[in-house]
């Protein structure tokens, strides 16, 4: 057994591609060797900006011999069949083996040297590599058949044990030589085997393990911040990116002019992160500090002073641009930006962004005026600081260090208590998209909404309006904060409902894996807003208010998304189906209360037995009395025709009543009478519980039917020879089914 080392060295590999490249390299290698029947005990992959590495542990020295057997025609088959088989196998008649009158072509494939398999696999892997973007280079690039790689391929190390595996790709010949760090050790390094590869490169200032580089950056950046009396703002994505940009990472801390802190902290962090790949820091009070941590790719002789100075200069230029955009945007009120939205197409079938704003404003007002969104909406307090639950809440948000109202913005905004909730919802909706045409959002689209919140606060809008403008896109994905402030909830719901309904109306529904307008994400956002805040609304009415013409399609869409969301929360999809099947239940808060009570019930012994009894009753009714869904009361206390006053109809009523009395005029079995009595008690109890939305109580009432139903099926013959008894007992089973269906359609429940 020997280890195999493959290093594919090239010009810089983008950091964002490195993790996937490691996975692809491993997958392609396993596939190529699998064709020869070889499998490694373990595979390790590494990536740096300049190299992609694979080490396959414990490979055999050669493949096992393979005996292949192909069944042919019978020995007595016509000559034409035999000739065709011989042509196919390339054998002669004498080389065939006969067994039980059937001819077989048996060939022995000898084992191959593993090195030979590897030599053929390396070029195949390079040619098949699925880089998101790749290029040709050199003279060979003139041919469309030339190999492609993410950047020009410069070297190949291929060692099986201590021996070079000879191969050639794009004019690059394999060997045992690689290069160290571009500056610290640019000379050649001869690798002895996979065993000394990592440590030899470390000695030449290259850390090949991406996880080790990330750990060095994480610890070094944190220590650099602490050394300056600050706290590092951790960022896993930025950490991985810095690890992918360096082979010898050295975290360094620098400073920028405090004057830039007049810019919202999110802008500073985004500028540092996106443009420069820097971490930011906070002071002891949690405010953003005028400090950054960059990651050098060199251990500089001056301790990194010149590197820090150069990076600070570049960051200052970026922050100057951001400060200019911010101060320029503040000179124009948001409402004065609205006419520009008329020139931005939202969708060719749905008009402009201005058209969408009009629809959302109308719907947001309707949500409040119809009593759906009330001042007490949400788990938090209406209008509380950071009431939207999103960024930037000055006390809790990870990337905010100042209130929404920034000290540089002038006098604080008015409290807004003099504006009605509906007025604030409509106002916020009308301003919510205005920041799309500002300079800052044009430069940083990620800040849409957030900057609108800052600008709204600066121009004196009520706090609830500014927060709604800021947070109306939320939640934008799983794990995102869900707004709780009433105005924000109204605008966020209106915005998402409008998108879903309008795209459905013009036939642009999600299909399969295609969802170009992120409607599934919008639907999950609506569900989160409704359920987390306990918002009670009929989806049918809400979608109608949003302009829906095909309610069923939209409701079905929400039902599917609800199943996805609740499945992740551990709720069974069949129970959701069971409640949806009742029809008319599209208040999701109430619907899920039913589902949760149902899930708790069916997992109990009473629930399981009642489900079994229900299914037995439903099967009998399906076979013996198809189409029955209602029953004639067994007690005789109610006459469904008693209110008919037409004298000409009186004889018919009397005959009906006489017939029904005859049907009931027999001695009931004790178990039959007991089930009727149990239903007489359970039905009104369940009805009252459902009316009070006490679905657990409704389940408890149904649970009392378990024993009487079991006894009924044990002691009573439903298909009695007496047609009156048979009809009455089938009606009793229908009554059981109907009682259960008032809570959920048990026929949809699995098990």
Image (cartoon, helix red, strand yellow):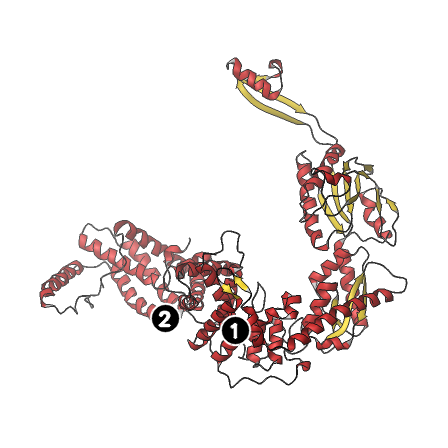
Camera-side residue: 242 or 363?
A: 363
Q: Is residue 681 left or right of residue 291?
A: left
Number of labels in the image equals 2
Dot 2 alpha-carbon crowd within 10 angstroms: few under 14, some 14 to 19, many 20 or more = some
Query: Label 2's element?
Result: helix
The relative height of residue 111 versus residue 424 in the rendered view (above or below) is: above
Which quadrant does the N terminus fall into? top right
Q: How far apart are marks 1 and 2 (CA)?
A: 39 Å
The relative height of residue 508 versus residue 145 in the rendered view (above or below) is: below
The answer, for residue 604, to whether it is visible in the render is: no
Dot 1 alpha-carbon crowd within 10 angstroms: few under 14, some 14 to 19, many 20 or more = many
Residue at image location 81% in from the left, 73% down from the top: 228
Camera-side residue: 237 or 142?
A: 142
Query: Label 1's element?
Result: helix
| Residue designated by label 2 | 689
Q: Is residue 704 left or right of residue 422?
A: left
Camera-side residue: 195 or 680?
A: 195
- Residue 6 badge: none
Camera-side residue: 153 or 710?
A: 153
User: Disc 1 or 2, which lies upstream in sequence?
Assistant: 1
Observer-side mark, 1 or 2, equals: 1
Q: Are marks 1 and 2 in contact (CB under 8 Å)?
A: no
Residue 3 in the image: x percent, y percent?
A: 77, 41
Residue 417 in the image: x percent, y percent?
A: 52, 85
The answer, for residue 29, to whether it is visible in the render is: yes
| Residue designated by label 1 | 429
Residue 10 in the image: x percent, y percent?
A: 78, 47
The relative height of residue 370 versus residue 625 in the rendered view (above or below) is: below
Residue 396 in the image: x percent, y percent?
A: 64, 74
Residue at image location 69% in from the left, 81% down from the top: 408
Q: Is residue 287 left or right of residue 576?
A: right
């Amino acid at each position: 057994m020997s280890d195999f080392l493959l290093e594919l060295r090239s010009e810089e590999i983008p950091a964002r591609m490195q993790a996937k490249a490691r996975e692809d390299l491993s997958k392609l290698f396993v596939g190529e060797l699998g064709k020869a029947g070889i499998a490694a005990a373990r595979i390790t992959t590494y990536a740096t900006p300049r190299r992609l590495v694979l080490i396959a542990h414990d490979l055999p020295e050669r493949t096992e011999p393979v005996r292949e057997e192909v069944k042919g025609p019978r020995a007595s088959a016509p000559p034409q069949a035999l000739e065709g088989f011989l042509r196919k196998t390339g054998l002669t008649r004498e080389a065939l083996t006969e067994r039980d009158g059937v001819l077989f072509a048996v060939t022995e494939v000898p084992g191959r040297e593993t090195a030979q398999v590897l030599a053929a696999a390396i070029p195949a892997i390079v040619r098949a590599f699925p880089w998101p973007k790749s290029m040709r280079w050199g003279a060979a690039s003139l041919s469309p058949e030339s190999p492609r790689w993410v950047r020009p391929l410069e070297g190949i190390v291929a060692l099986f044990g201590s021996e070079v595996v000879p191969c050639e790709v794009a004019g690059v010949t394999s060997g045992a030589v690689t290069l160290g760090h571009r500056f610290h050790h640019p000379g050649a390094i001869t690798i002895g085997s996979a065993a000394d590869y990592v440590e030899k490169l470390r000695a030449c200032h290259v850390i090949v393990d991406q996880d080790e580089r990330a750990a060095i950056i994480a610890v070094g950046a944190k220590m650099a911040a602490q050394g300056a009396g600050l706290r590092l703002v951790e960022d896993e994505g930025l950490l991985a990116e810095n690890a992918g940009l360096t082979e010898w990472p050295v975290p360094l801390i620098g400073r920028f002019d405090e004057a830039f802190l007049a810019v919202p902290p999110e802008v500073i962090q985004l500028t540092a992160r996106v443009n420069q790949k820097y971490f930011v820091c906070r002071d002891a009070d949690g405010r953003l500090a005028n400090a950054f941590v960059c990651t050098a790719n060199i251990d500089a002789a001056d301790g990194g002073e010149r590197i820090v100075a150069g990076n600070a200069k570049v960051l200052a230029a970026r922050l100057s641009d951001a400060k200019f955009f911010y101060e320029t945007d503040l000179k124009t009120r948001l409402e004065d930006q609205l006419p520009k939205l008329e020139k931005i197409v939202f969708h060719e079938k749905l008009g402009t962004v201005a058209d969408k704003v009009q629809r959302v404003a109308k719907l947001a007002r309707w949500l409040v005026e119809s009593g759906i969104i009330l001042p007490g909406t949400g788990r938090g307090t209406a209008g509380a600081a950071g009431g939207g639950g999103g960024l930037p809440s000055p006390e809790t948000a990870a990337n905010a260090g100042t209130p929404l109202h920034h000290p540089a913005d002038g006098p604080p905004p008015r409290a807004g208590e003099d504006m009605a909730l509906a007025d604030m919802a409509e106002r916020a909706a009308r301003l919510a998209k205005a920041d799309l045409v500002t300079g800052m959002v044009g430069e940083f689209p990620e800040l849409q909404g957030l900057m609108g919140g800052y600008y709204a606060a600066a121009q004196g809008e009520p706090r609830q309006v500014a927060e709604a403008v800021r947070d109306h896109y939320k939640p934008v994905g799983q794990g995102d904060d869900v707004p709780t402030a009433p105005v924000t909830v109204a605008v966020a719901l209106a915005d998402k409902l409008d998108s879903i309904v309008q795209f459905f109306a013009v036939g642009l529904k999600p299909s399969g894996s295609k969802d170009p307008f992120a409607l599934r994400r919008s639907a999950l956002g609506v569900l989160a807003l409704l359920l987390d805040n306990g918002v009670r609304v009929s989806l049918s009415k809400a979608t109608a208010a949003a302009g829906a013409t095909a309610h069923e399609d939209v409701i079905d869409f929400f039902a599917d998304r609800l199943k996805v969301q609740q499945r992740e929360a551990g709720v069974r999809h069949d129970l959701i189906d069971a409640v949806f099947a009742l029809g008319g239940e599209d208040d999701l808060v109430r619907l899920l209360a039913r589902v949760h009570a149902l899930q708790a019930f069916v997992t109990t012994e009473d629930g399981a037995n009642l489900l079994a009894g229900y299914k037995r009753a439903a099967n009998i009714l399906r076979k013996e009395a198809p189409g029955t869904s209602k029953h004639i009361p067994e007690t005789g206390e109610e006459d469904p025709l008693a209110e008919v006053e037409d004298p000409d109809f009186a004889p018919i009523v009397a005959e009906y009543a006489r017939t029904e009395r005859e049907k009931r005029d027999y001695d009931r079995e004790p178990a039959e009478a007991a089930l009727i009595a149990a239903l007489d008690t359970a039905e009104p109890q369940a009805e009252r519980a459902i009316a009070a939305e006490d679905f657990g109580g409704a389940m408890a009432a149904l649970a009392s039917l378990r024993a009487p139903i079991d006894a009924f099926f044990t002691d009573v013959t439903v298909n009695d020879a007496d047609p009156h008894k048979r009809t009455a007992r089938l009606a009793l089973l229908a009554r059981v089914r109907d009682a259960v269906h008032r809570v959920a359609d048990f026929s949809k429940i699995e098990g």
